[in-house]
Image: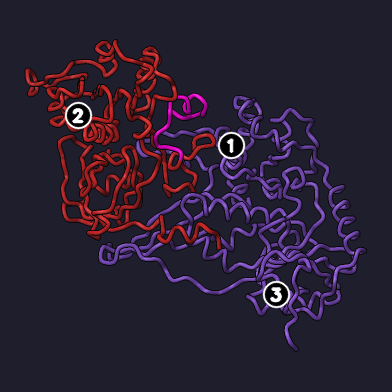
Amino acid sequence: MATEVLLGQGSVRILPKKYAAQFYKNLGVFGELHGPVQVKPGLVVFGPAASFSDLALDQVRTLLPVKKYLFPPKEEQYRFSTREGFVEPEVEEKRTVLFGVHPCDINAVALLDRVTSWKYPDPKYRARRQRLIIVGVDCIPDEYCFCLPMGSHTADEGFDLFLTDIGEEYFVQVGSSLGERMLRESWDLVKQVEQEHIEAFHQRAEERQKAFRHDLDAHRLAQAILVGFSSPVWDEVGKKCLSCGSCAATCPTCCCYDVLDEVNLDLKSGVRIRRWDDCMQPEFALVAGGHNFRAERSTRFKMRFMHKINSFKAEFQRLGCVGCGRCIAGCPADINVIEVFQKITGKKVTSVAG
Amino acid sequence: MLAEDFAVNSDPLKPHLARLVHIDKSVKDRYVFHFRFEDPELNESFSYRPGQFVMLSVLGAGEAPISLCSPASRRGTIELCVNRVGRVTNALYRLRENDLVGIRGPYGNGFPVEEMEGHDVLLVAGGIGAAPIRGLLWYLLDNRNKYGNITFLCGSRSTKDMLFREEFESLLNRPDIRCLLAVEAVPEEDEGKWPGDVGMVTDLFKYVKEIDAERTYAAVCGPPVFYKFVLRHLVDLNIDKDRILMSLERRMKCGVGKCAHCMIGDKYTCIHGPIFTYWDAMKLPEMI
């Protein structure tokens, strides 16, 4: 069959749910299939998922976000020796198709893309990013979700395909040329979009929007943090915070890192390791000589938000929080960032079931 | 693939091998290390602005940000004045001439030397702060006709602790710069030999009364306590807060605006600094 040339026909298609498993299988042509899988009750992680039935698509959030594919918790940065200098380790060429990524996480990847290409591009991130194929799937928010006020409840960029659940079918948006090729692989499974599908798409959007229950004003956050720099809110949170760093580890946009050298037994060569770090750790801003610029937990907590809100806004014209709710779900001290944002902007606190 | 990927073809995080060619041990625990890149081409092309810094790798010990103290106007050898204070710097002190290290950079904004052209410059250095200020000082002197009056104030604990002491003393007689030096103490062996003042660096401001504040830039670097006193004098002299330039230090792991260790408020010391204005410091919390 000659390939049909389609121009100007838009980048949307309809996938009946009954074909979803086959559609998923066909994506395997493009890379190893991964998605959200339930490893035990209450714990969903992104991991290998050979078939559609392995996916836990009804779950709101995975423990770790997409960043673990792009920016591993620990990686070899260079091998070094006095003879060879610093040499990059060999990279794996494997491609991964990550299925079931929610809009907040897609927005977070788009932010990581900007951070890692800002001023000095990060070659390791860029190489991994080019090998990660993202298929988004929409979701219904739970009590920890606040992507709507953060402007991350829809994804406009950063995916190859995006599937919206409109009942018996998925509404498929194509986000890249590779996404178009992926759709071609399943061309016999998808059909044209009719007016009724568009209506169902908007209805679903309305439904999602209604499910958000928190009153937040993201636009005022940067200003409120500067104005409220000496607000008692920070001390209040600082007293509760355990500096465990689970908020930063599970945050889809936190990408601070530490670098350390491991020496081989010959004492002449070794490896330079880069690993996740987080600004909640007491020694994060500690300099040689012993001065600590942020010795108190409250100042570290405040710094985290100055970075996410003020710095991201200044450099990337977007806030660095996508409202995924992972930091709330995972905090052992029950610190709720929605509450912190509400308090710092002088709003009424909407309670969240703990 | 983003457009930026085409623009940058080298890995900004990869250090280049450099050889330790000389160690100036004039001041205890504040040696000046001289390096040359192993790659002759890189050694020739490596250029930087006064006030910028490099990431120095002592193989096996790790990496630390060190400000360049050699004059940016003279290429060939990189000079780093290193305070022996942490893990990496202690390892550096164990190296000998001819040993290899890794260096990448230069990073940071550096002093706005173009913007400063046509202005008078007041440089104030305290202790280890003399390192980045010295780089700027020689840049100004090497481009002498582009700048107005140059006044250099430098203080240290004792004559034994004064970095680049011989070099600075030789400036005392140079007609195109006003050099004022102060030490808090003169040890016995230097008695009668010290040509400068005895006192704090701030005491030197008594000689700096007649400045044209409207056309003066101040560049200051020193330990945190030093800023608190020096800034007061500069404000009393009526110098605009955004023309008072300060070089700051922070913990850094990348030097390229990624690892976020060096953040102060919403700014990265490695990208927006290490040269900040006093106005920045007033706006940003926890700066000094």
**Residue shown at 68%/48% (left/top)?**
A322
**Residue shown at 70%/36% (left/top)?**
A219
Q: Would you say residue A315 is visible in this rendering?
A: yes
Q: Would you say residue B128 is visible in this rendering?
A: no
Q: Which residue is mark 2?
A: B161
Q: Quadrant of the N terminus of chain A?
A: bottom right
Q: Position of residue B30 (x, y in %)?
A: 23, 37
Q: Which residue is mark 1?
A: A306
Which corner quadrant of the image does residue A54 belong to?
bottom right
Q: Position of residue B89 (x, y in %)?
A: 29, 45
Q: Nearer the viewer, mark 1 or mark 3?
A: 3
Q: Nearer the viewer, mark 3 or mark 2?
A: 3
Q: Gap in Å between the C-alphas at discs 3 and 2? A: 68 Å
Q: Nearer the viewer, mark 2 or mark 1?
A: 1
State whether residue A168 is above or below residue B30.
Answer: below
Which amino acid, mark 3?
Met
Residue segment shown in magenta:
B272-288
Q: Is residue B153 left or right of residue B228?
A: left
Q: Residue furthest right?
A: A196
The secondary structure type at the circle numbered 3 is helix
Q: Is residue A286 left or right of residue A51?
A: left
Answer yes or no: do the residues labelled 1 and 3 have beta carbons within 8 Å? no
* Chain colored purple: A
Colouring style: by chain
How packed mark 3 is, by other alpha carbons closer than 10 Å (few <14, some 14-19, many 20 or more), is: many
Q: Is residue B36 magenta?
A: no
Q: Which residue is mark 3?
A: A182
Which amino acid, mark 1?
Met
Which amino acid, mark 2?
Asp
